[in-house]
Amino acid sequence: MRRVALVGAGLSRFGVRAAGFRELLAEAGQACFASVPHVTPKDIEGLVVGAVLPERAAFQSHIAPLAAETLGIQPRKLSARTEHMCASGSVGIRYAYAFIAAGLADIVMVLGVEKLNLPNMGEAVLNMGAGVDRDWEACFGLTAPPAFALAAQLHMAEYGTTEEQLAQVAVKNHTHSSKNPHAHFQNGVTLDAVVCSRMIASPLRLFMCSPITDGAAAVILASEERARDMTDKPVFIRGTGQAVHGFSVSSLDPDYASWPAMKQAAGDAYAMAGIRASALDFAEVHDCFAIAEIIAYEELGFCSKGEGGPFAAEGRSDYGGDVVVNPRGGLMGCGHPLGATGVAQGVEAFWQLRGEAGERQVPEAHIGLTHNNSGMGEHVVMIYGRE
Amino acid sequence: MSEYFRAIDPFPLQSSKNTRLTPFYEALRSQKLLTTFCPRCALRHWPPRVVCPECLAARLDWVDLPSRGTVHAYTIQDTGVPPGFPRPLIFAVVLVEGLRIFTRLVETEPTQVERGCTVRLCPSAVGWDPEGDERYVPTFALVQENA
């Protein structure tokens, strides 16, 4: 297989945006091309677009050709949309990676885009139920917060994780996003404000949850040979893994505060990269809710099972700790425009590994991980490195 | 607009025109809980299946489940409840003879729910299907002797 690198990356501003679906993807696409001046839309041989809810939120399917036309791209090797709920963006990066590694294309763009905020926010909330099992979950009114709240309840009961530890994860990520000009939330938040914020689904309070966010992200991937012509600082995909153990809450592991599919995806990615967790300088993990980041520490191998709460409380996931987790601010700080999130994690890895992350730069970042999930039993892990 | 929501509401279509799981929903209407059993694997499923996920057999038997279970974990959602659903929503994982059933508790005071408490099947009507039959979903309720 050929080696594959990111050569360009760009984001739209994330937030409640006065912009439509097409405008958001155009913004990210423009920013991405601006980051790699030697590449024009006509050089792009393939386009993969991650998007989850355009049929409901924008009354629009047929997304990849729409995005191509918007950006002046005429794909000749690959054109596809990926939909895998919250992991759609990372799944798209894996497609592009595989196509290039196999020699079927040399240069592929991956876009992730989501327009979630609508004039009728009730409809925006109802739409989120489309990502769970209609027959056995959505019919009860389930959306993501209570599903992850159940895992939090079990984690607290089984391992003694506390509400304060959940809050500390939220404070860390909001502090990080205060240094990210693309983030939905840039004001930071205090521990008091988190533990006094409105209860969403017990024990998860407002600031322990990612918000409903509009946004888009884009990266350009190329074969190593082409990448070296385009930039002095390619960022290589060193490893990747994906595992799906179950779709619905009822089919999760009996201890649903343990997510073995994440451990499996990470194990495959580490083996492919030839590294251990201790080699990582940073990790962008899927903190859709604070409990998810705590479980991620455990399943990614940063600490042992049940130690995720203390790991956060002792600052081991912050600057100066074992590994900087979510330097961009994660989903809690940046927002979670579903299809865009996995691609935005790749954008952050690109900036961190090129030393272009500004105030939130992780010192001497050589290798980093991204983790994107689409449910508690479905996980994607990518490992990116300078070499 | 109401027609639009009705066409794509989040509730399963339950008549035999739309699903092979109609026996489950008919039993639910009479306050009984069924699930599928694969005779080849000697495996009981939850939720009911149209094929056995272990051997892919499509010939599955219907078996009765007890209508009582215990709460393994629960959460109370106050904010961000989808339109058309009551507030607050109490979601729970309920253990019924070793099966983990994700469900919602109804007719229940949120402050009285605890891990390990006993709940009973209490199906909820959720709206008519295109054939004009009321549809039900398998919600549970707290058994009062817990309180």
Image: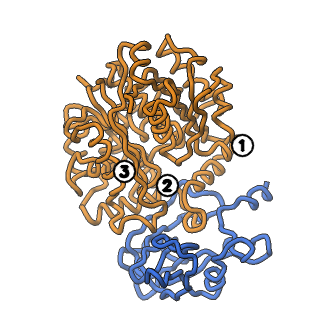
Chain colours: A orange, B blue
Question: Above or below — where is A51 with respect to A18?
Answer: below
Q: CA distance from mark 3 to mark 2?
A: 12 Å
Q: Residues within 10 Å of mark 1 (few under 14, many from 20)?
A: few
Image coordinates of residue B7 in percent, x first then y, are: 76, 60
Residue on which the image places disc 3: A292
Query: Which quarter of the figure is the N terminus of chain A placed in?
Result: top left
- Marks 3 and 1, how far apart in space? 31 Å
> Looking at the picture, which amino acid does disc 2 mark?
Ala
Q: Residue at x 58, y 56 (%)?
A: A129
Q: Is disc 1 placed on a helix, strand or loop?
A: loop
Per the image, label 2 sits on a secondary structure element best described as: helix
Q: Are marks 3 and 2 in contact (CB under 8 Å)?
A: no
For the residues marked 2 and 1, what is the alpha-carbon distance in whole angstroms? 22 Å
Chain letter of disc 1?
Answer: A
Rendered-image quadrant of the C terminus of chain A: top left
Is residue A184 in sight in this rendering? no
Q: Residue at x 63, y 77 (%)?
A: B21
Check the residue under mark 3 and report the chain it is in.
Answer: A
The residue tagged 2 is: A144
> How far across and how far down the image is residue A63, in percent?
65, 37
Image quarter of residue A173: top left
Question: Residue at 26% of width from left, 26% of height from top?
Answer: A366
- State the mark number for residue A59: 1
- Callout 2: chain: A
Crowding around mark 2 (Cα neighbors within 10 Å: few <14, some 14 to 19, many 20+) is some
Query: Which of the 4 image quadrants contains residue B92?
Result: bottom left
